[in-house]
Image (spheres, helix red, strand yellow):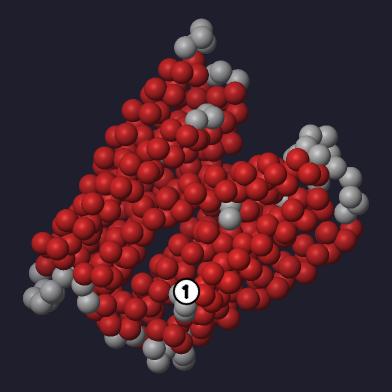
Amino acid sequence: MLPLSEKSFTKYKDHILQILAYALNLIFIMGAAYFLDLDEFGIFSYKFVIASIFAVGLKFGLDSVFQYFSQRVNFRGLSEIILTLLILVLATSALICSFIGYPEIIIYVIAALIAIDEIFYSIKRVEGKAAEFLMLRNILIVTRIISICFYNSDHYSILSVYCYSILPSIIFYLVQVLKKYKSEKMIMQEGLSQNGSFQDIANFSLKTTFSNLMGVLSVKIDIIILAFFVSYSQLGIYEIGARWGFIAMIPITLFSVINAPIISKLGKRKRKKHLLVYFNDSRRKVFFITTIYFLALILVRLILAIFDINWEYNPLDIALILATGFTFSSYFGPTGTAIVMLGFPGRHLVRIFISLMINILLNLLLIQYIGIYGAAIAVSSVLVISSIMSQILFQNTLKAIFKESHE
């Protein structure tokens, strides 16, 4: 028998390693903030956000494709389809960028590397080897942190370090995928034909990309709008605070990943009572963890208030404003994930779209009057509104699914 702590680690090792990756990435970003002056860090933050958004488009939902189609199409057939789509997307986007002259080559390269890295990560998740991938990723992030201690003259140096640090992982798993591709026979499993698969996968990828783009814009649009209204130094201050505020989002994100397959299974089996027990248990855990972090932020803010620090904008205030929204949202639990896993992604998409539009309007309005605090208030307000909408949709979804159930 394994000890309880060892059992827990074995069960949740992927999530523990993912938390470690979040922590190491935060150290990397804070390291960049330490070595660069505020203007340079603001430019770095803006370009990195643009690359992250661009990466969602470049991966074209292909990371989700492996998870949803791996049981319907064999590895070799699926690899050929995904490789074809990836080449088409990368080539088309590169051609468009060459004509319009945007973004900078470094932004495009980072976006492409992030996209490919995420696709390989999805393959390892399907194979049940996510921990192996995350271990390598964390090692590379550590080398990235060490590297910026020596290469930190400007934002371009930091971005270049990021590029070089992600390459070994991509090369390593590219070799692995090619080896597996060669060893697989071209035998389609029962389900879709090869031609049908391409069309279905392309349609699935397009819908997923649209949904993912709106999702990432809903949490990144504040940085983009701020870049047009405030200085890069103020943008840098906001990014420092936002990074600490967004830590409050990690619990609900991780529990969403854990809960997704179980919620889907219970929904298909019409087990309402079991689903609600499981969901509410997870919801309470998410809210408890997020609340502890929120209270810790308040404590740190009160301690720092003792010292006479002349802040134009206090990053901890920004973190607290954002954490307030995430804490409120965590009370309802991962309702968005539940709606999708219960078979109603359209409702989730509408909610994200409405939230994004409100977010844009509030940011445009508030930033003009109270600067970067306005961006934080806008995002936090939208989190509250969005979580309430999601809760209402979740309850309506349960009624729609279980109206004929005896439970």
| 100 relative to 376 in the view: left or right | right
Give, as a three-letter code, the residue at label 1: Ile
Q: Is residue 267 left or right of residue 175?
A: left
Whether residue 27 is visible to the viewer of this picture, yes or no, is: no
Farthest-out residue, front: 99
Secondary element under disc 1, as helix, strand or loop, is helix
Q: Position of residue 397 (x, y in %)?
A: 44, 24
- Count of marks placed on residues: 1
Residue at the image point whose x is 48% and y is 58% from the top: 19
- The residue located at (47%, 74%) in the rendering is 100
The answer to whether residue 155 shows anywhere in this view is: yes
Callout 1: 10 Å neighbours few (<14), some, many (20+)?
Answer: few
- Residue at image position (47%, 69%) is 51
User: Viewer-proximal residue, 205 or 30?
Assistant: 205
The residue at 47%/34% (across/down) is: 346
- Residue 239 location in percent, x, y? 30, 68
- Say if 346 sits above or below 20 in the image: above
Relative depth, front residue between 173 and 284: 173
Q: Position of residue 196 (x, y in %)?
A: 75, 40
Question: Which residue in the protein does label 1 denote?
Answer: 100
Give the position of the N terminus as an image quadrant.
top right
Q: Quadrant of residue 207?
A: top right
* Along the line of sight, the residue nearer the viewer: 207 or 247: 207
Q: Residue 233: x and y, percent?
A: 24, 79
Q: Is residue 63 above or below residue 101?
A: above
